Image: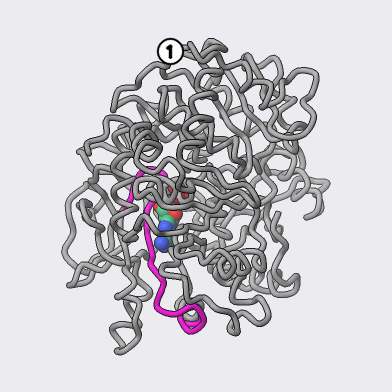
Amino acid sequence: MEFATVGDVLRRNAAAHPDKTAFVFGETRVSFAGHLDRAEQVARAIAAAGVALQDRVAVMSRNTRAFMEVYAGAELSGYIVATVNFRLAAPEVQRIVSIARPRILFYEAAFEPVVETLVGSGVQLFVAIGGEPAAWAVSYEDFVATADPAQPLASPDIDDILHLIFTSGSTGTPKGVMRSHRTELAVCNYFATEIEMQPEDRLLLMMPVFHVGHRFMQLGGHFRAAEIHVQADFNPRAILDTIERERITITHLAPTMVKALLDVPGVDARDFGSLKSIVYSGAPMPVPHLEHGMRVFGDVFLQLYGMSEGSATTLHRHEHRIRTAQDRQRLASVGRASRGVALRIADRADRAVPIGAVGEVQLRAPTIMKGYWNDSEATVAALHGGWYHTGDMGRLDEDGYLYLVDRAKDMIISGGENIYSREVETAIASHPMVEDVAVIGFPDAYWGEIVLAIVVARDPAPSAETVIAHCRSQIASYKKPRSVVFATDLPRLASGKVDKVALRRAFGRTADAAASSGGSPAPA
Ligand code: AMP
């Protein structure tokens, strides 16, 4: 069947498998017919509130049923869902809202203090998910009840935008990745095929659904009419219990989460016989963790490398084997270009480099975004010449396996979350006692990388705690430095840019010592 919109997948599922379970949220099971019915109500209520085709609706929520319904309403009726990472600080959320200009903001009651700062910012309606709504908001259920069954729904075009996924971007300015019905239909096919999803599969998804990882897994699952179990939090023991109890066949984890599951006492005595695939992505997975995981969970690992802008490579389950030295070496790769993806390694002038040489990973694929919302400069920089410029540096081997070696974009990945150095630097530099600052990432056994700030202080100098507390007031807690060191000046390149290679060399040991003395920091 040819689908013209992502909403057609929902309609097909409701027609072909009305009673089959689409979603499981704790004790609540929702059938495909039930999900379509609710999605239509939500879409009608949103239309009745004056939201037209391609107007934006923002969501700041954990993985709630309401979030999935708002997504599904957009699939059916053509408004755009702009996602807001619920861990962001008020100034960051304000920037996203000023770019996306949503008419409605759906928010989970726990985030009310941040959302309150948006009252008067042009958002016309605030809808509270769960809990008592504030005086300036309405409750989600009251809002859905305003739907008029006679309200006609608009029909989106295949090239209309379905979501704006906000990423921070190396400039520190949020960028809304435009994902259209066409790109998301390509994602449906890509995820269902690469992961070999089947209608009998039971997926367990707990990464935040404002990230593409969870969202794309969901699209693939729906495409195969599989059952999707959603959890809002990452509780390692609860995840293991759910896998055993619900006979989960596919799950998706960041490498840090795999490590956390392996650390649960008694993990190797459990029954993971139902598991077919553990999909991991988002950050490099240390090979020893992977080997440990394969001993405990079996030959179930499948790696994806990609980004909010599109999909790139797969290291399939059968490529996760350790028979030869070459097999082991390949575990450190991100696999080969996935089906339908053209991948090349290019130099600064966008010329393809020879096999084995390091350059930027560039992609051409049907899953690649349309561009960045209202940001033609960033769009041209990312997509010029018909290739998506990932900002990741890598090399290919003779057999087409891709090894990521560095990032051209100044980005730190901590626990699977991307942190752009620039936004942490901007936050710290706004403190009056700070003269200059540079932020770098350092390897950490648990988090993958941690944030280290090197600060040149004014007189009087701030304490490390003051710097961290100030940073926390400006940006999300998980982006704050785990460690602050003070220096008299920062090394610079001839171009005037801070020489981060020199900083990494100079401060590596300091960061390691700080991380090991404090142990693994708690999730922010
Ligand atoms: P995001 O847009 O938040 O999904 O982040 C995408 C970035 O995460 C990529 O450009 C890579 O730098 C990194 N990334 C994603 N998947 C992997 C992976 N499997 N291995 C290493 N890095 C990854």
Q: Position of residue 299 (x, y in %)?
A: 40, 78
Number of residue marks? 1
Residue 238, quarter of the rendered image: bottom right
Rendering coords of residue 233 (x, y %) = 65, 54
Question: How busy is the neighbourhood of tag 1: few (under 14 within 10 Å), some, or many (20 plus)?
Answer: few
Looking at the picture, tell me which residue is in the foreground, 450 or 182: 182
Q: Is residue 307 visible?
A: no
Q: From this view, report whether residue 280 is shown above or below residue 14.
A: below
Residue at horizontal 34 percent and vertical 82 percent from the top: 321
The region drawn magenta spans: 291-311
Q: Which is more toward the observer, 168 or 2?
A: 2
In percent of the image, x 71 and y 58: which residue is there?
484
Q: Residue at x 57, y 22 (%)?
A: 98
Task: Please say whether residue 297 is one of the residues in the magenta stretch.
Answer: yes
Residue at horizontal 73 percent and vertical 45 percent from the top: 472
Q: Quadrant of ligand 1?
A: bottom left
Residue ID for mark 1:
152
Look at the image and say whether residue 506 sits in the magenta stretch.
no
Instruction: Give 359 or 203, whichever is nearer the viewer.
Output: 203
User: In the displayed structure, would residue 380 be above or below residue 511?
Assistant: above
Q: Position of residue 364 (x, y in %)?
A: 23, 46
Element carrying mark 1? loop
Split into 4 quadrants, where in the image is the N terminus? top left
Indicate left or right for 307 with 450 as reference.
Answer: left
Quarter of the image with the C terminus is bottom right
Image spot of residue 467 (x, y percent) = 75, 49
User: Residue 241's image quarter?
Assistant: bottom right
